[in-house]
Structure formats: C-alpha cells, structure tokens
C-alpha cells in the first residue's frame, strides 16, 4: 500500500507540474490524487472506521484553512469591487521596475508578519493588478511577492501556520522568534532583491482606467469605509485568535459578516441593479473557486501520506541518516517545497519533545525559519504560492525557471545568517 500511495502522489505531482502540457486543470488532478490516495488507504486497511476517523480529523483541520481562504478572497474581492485599492495604488507613483519591486517586497514582508503570508499574498497580488498592466511583468512581481510573504511570515508567531503551530504548542515564544528570525528572514528576502537590482531594467505600465465599468459609481467616502473595514478585519484576525483561542477561520468569517453588513448598509438606498456589482454575492462569483479546490486536493493528498505514517517514517529516516540537527532542519525546509510544511512540522513535533529540545531551543526556532521560507522554492510549496498560482495562473515550470533559484539563494542566505547569529550569541 505504501508504495502505491507514493507512486500515486508522485504521478499526481508531475501531472500538476505539467499542467500546461497536458492542458488538464491542476485542480482536477489534485482532487483525483487526494481522492485516490484515501481510497487506496481504506481499501488496504482492515480498520475502515479508523481510516474514516483519520479523514474526518484531517477534514476538520483542512476546512478551517479552506474557509479562511474563501473568506479572505471574498473580502479582497469586495474591496476591489468598491475600488478600495485605488486609494492605495493611486499614491504609488513609482514605475521603475527595480524601485517598485523593492517597495512592494517590503510592504509584503511587514504586512505578512501582521496578517499572515496567505492573506498578504492575496491582498498584494490584487494590488499588483492595479499597478502593472503587462501580465509577464505581473507574474514576475507575484513570484517575488511569494518569497517576501513567506519570509515575512516566518519571523512572526502569527505570520505562518507552522510558526503558529510551534508557538501554540510551546516550542517557541513570540519574543524569541521575532528576535532570532527577523534578520535571517530579512536576508532571505534581500538576497533575491539585490540580485534582481542588477538584472531588472525599464518601467512598468499601469493599467488604463475603464470608465465604462459599472462598479465605478462609488464615492470616495464609501471606498475609504470598505477599504479601512476590510483591512481592519484582516489585521484583527490574529488578535481575535490570541484573545479567544478560536481558530482563525472563525475570526475571518465574523469579519466577513461585519463587512457584509457594512456594505449592505451603505448601499441600502440603491436599487438592485446599481448595487449588484457591489455585493458579497458578486465578490463570491469573482473569487477563483478552482484554486480553492486545488488547495483542498493537495492538502488531502498530504493528509493521506501523514495518516499512513509515510511522512513520519521519512522524518525518522532523515534523523538516522543525517544525524546533525541543523542538517535535518535545513533538509526539512527543502522538503517543504515539495510537500506541505504543516505535516512536516507536525511530524517533527511528534519526534522531538520539549525534554529533548526545550522551549526556544535553536532547533525549534531554526525549524520555524526553514519550513516557513523553504516552501518558496516551488510554487506549490506554500499556501502563499498556491494562492498566487490560482490568482495569476502561474505555471509550475514558469516559476521553476524564473523564481526558484532566487528563492533557493535567499533561503541559503537566511540559513547562513541564522547560523552566524547563533554562533555570535553563543560566543
């Protein structure tokens, strides 16, 4: 069974990678891969009820991610429907590619630490559509946004799901992860930016404003209200989670309800035709549903590998083979670009207890950095990458050719910065 599962996953992975060659939507492949993996698991297992319990457990966790993604995308689309992002993009006058890339990257880096890498990617990629007309230029910027979002999320306890897992379970504290990972994460982003400063040339062309668009009948006051409310909702989700200890999707669903209420209230005086393009129903129609289904397929595939013990056994094999803890963590970071970093961190948490590595041990801090930023090396290696892939239709091989090496160099730079920092701290 184990060999069959691995073959099915690898085959599905390659079909997703060759989407532009096969002309088969990646969401279809991901759903087939996930469904087949669980079918194989239950067919070969004598304990059918146990398999169903595993699936139900994983779907409970995955549904939280999917509902979060759905609500975040809807909020962003609702802001866009009201031209709220124009209030930001109209103030960004920079058209030089190098300067704009640095500006966008730093905005992404710090915003990701406040929100999280997934939400930030959705917001910033939406902004890029307002700033850059050429799809090829926009793809390139979106690729760098993935690197910056993952780097920014790694040094914050609420910026990446794996860092949050380590924080909640007591392996790291908020102060330690910020103090010890800010510089490595910054280096991870700066290395690609410095390289690109010698490569990028020219200026970007902004999209033309379409005066015929029906949704333009929105006052500046209403644009400001929706933009401020939407961003406040996104930024308050981590606060809500910290205070209530409820999962983030509850907070963002409440936030979507609040924003829905606000938009219904401010457009209550308009007739149905005028308000149709300003409603949540309109925003829901505009979100990229196939990308959400793709995300579901990928996650349930990984869940099958986790439930059958494949990932845990692989992690144990790495421990026995590599030995050195830093080498293990760096390898897990590289591996997180291929499979989801959540089960990898979960496996590490199960293998090493706090007696072995106490709270804020460099092993846990380094694990947060590597699994948080390692996913940038492949487009499907992180939630930010999957979201950008769906929003801008970025192909696996386009990213591999143009962004992966930059992400790898940034990852290595951050690893070096962390190890040097630890050497200095230890004297």
Image (cartoon, rainbow, N blue to C red):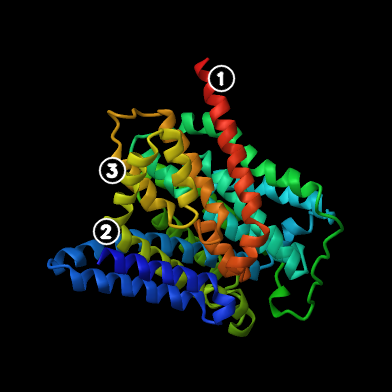
Q: Which residue is mark 2?
A: 307
Is residue 366 at least partly visible in the picture? yes
Disc on res. 424: 1
Q: Residues within 10 Å of mark 1 (few under 14, many from 20)?
A: few
Viewer-side residue, 162 vs 280: 162
N-terminal of the pair, mark 2 or mark 1, is: 2
Residue 418 in picture, x, y percent from top left:
55, 31
Residue 108 in picture, x, y percent from top left:
64, 49
N-terminal of the pair, mark 3 or mark 1, is: 3
Q: Residues within 10 Å of mark 2 (few under 14, many from 20)?
A: some
Query: Which residue extends farthest top?
Result: 427
Viewer-side residue, 170 vs 371: 371
Q: Is residue 379 left or right of residue 66?
A: right
User: What is the spatial separation of the Cα atoms under label 2 and label 3, in whole angstroms?
Assistant: 13 Å
User: What is the spatial separation of the Cα atoms under label 2 and label 1, in whole angstroms?
Assistant: 41 Å
Query: Which residue extends farthest bottom?
Result: 273
Residue at screen point 83% across, 53% down:
94
Query: Which residue extends farthest right?
Result: 202
Residue 48 in picture, x, y percent from top left:
15, 69
Residue at screen point 41% across, 34% down:
325
Residue at screen point 36% across, 71% down:
8
Q: Which residue is mark 3?
A: 350
Residue at screen point 78% across, 69% down:
134
């Amino acid at each position: 069974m184990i060999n069959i599962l691995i073959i099915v996953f690898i085959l599905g992975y390659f079909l997703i990678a060759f989407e532009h060659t096969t002309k088969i939507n990646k969401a279809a492949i991901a759903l087939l891969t996930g469904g087949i993996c669980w079918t194989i698991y239950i067919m070969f297992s004598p304990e059918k009820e146990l398999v169903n319990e595993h699936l139900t457990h994983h779907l409970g966790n995955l549904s939280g991610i999917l509902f979060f993604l759905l609500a975040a995308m809807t909020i962003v689309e609702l802001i866009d429907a009201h031209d709220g992002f124009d209030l930001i993009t109209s103030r960004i006058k920079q058209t030089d590619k190098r300067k704009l890339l640095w500006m966008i990257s730093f905005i992404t880096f710090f915003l990701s630490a406040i929100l999280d890498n997934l939400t930030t990617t959705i917001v910033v990629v939406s902004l890029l559509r307002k700033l850059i007309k050429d799809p090829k230029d926009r793809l390139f910027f979106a690729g760098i946004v993935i690197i910056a979002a993952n780097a920014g999320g790694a040094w914050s306890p609420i910026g990446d799901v794996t860092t949050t897992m380590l924080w909640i379970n007591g392996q790291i504290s908020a102060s330690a992860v910020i103090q010890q990972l800010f510089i490595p994460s910054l280096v991870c982003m700066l290395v690609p930016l410095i390289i690109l400063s010698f490569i990028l040339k020219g200026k970007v062309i902004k999209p033309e404003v379409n005066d015929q668009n029906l949704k333009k009948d929105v006052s500046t006051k209403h644009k400001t209200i929706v933009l401020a409310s939407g961003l406040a909702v996104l930024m308050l989700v981590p606060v809500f989670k910290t205070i209530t200890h409820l999962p983030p999707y509850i907070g963002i669903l409440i936030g979507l309800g609040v924003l829905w209420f606000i938009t219904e209230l401010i457009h209550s005086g308009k007739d149905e035709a005028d308000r149709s393009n300003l409603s949540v129903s309109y925003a829901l129609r505009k979100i990229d549903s196939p990308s959400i289904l793709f995300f579901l397929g990928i996650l349930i595939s990984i869940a099958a590998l986790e439930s059958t013990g494949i990932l845990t056994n692989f992690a144990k094999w790495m421990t026995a083979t590599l030995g050195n803890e830093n080498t293990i963590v760096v390898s897990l970071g590289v591996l997180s670009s291929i499979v989801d970093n959540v089960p990898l961190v979960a496996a590490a948490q199960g293998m090493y207890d706090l007696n072995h590595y106490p709270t804020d041990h460099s092993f846990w801090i380094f694990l947060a950095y590597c699994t948080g930023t390692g996913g940038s090396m492949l487009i499907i290696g992180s939630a930010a990458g999957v979201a950008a892939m769906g929003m801008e239709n970025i192909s696996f091989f386009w990213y591999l050719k143009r962004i992966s090496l930059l992400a790898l160099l940034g990852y290595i730079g951050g690893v070096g910065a962390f190890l040097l920092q630890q050497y200095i701290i230890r004297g």
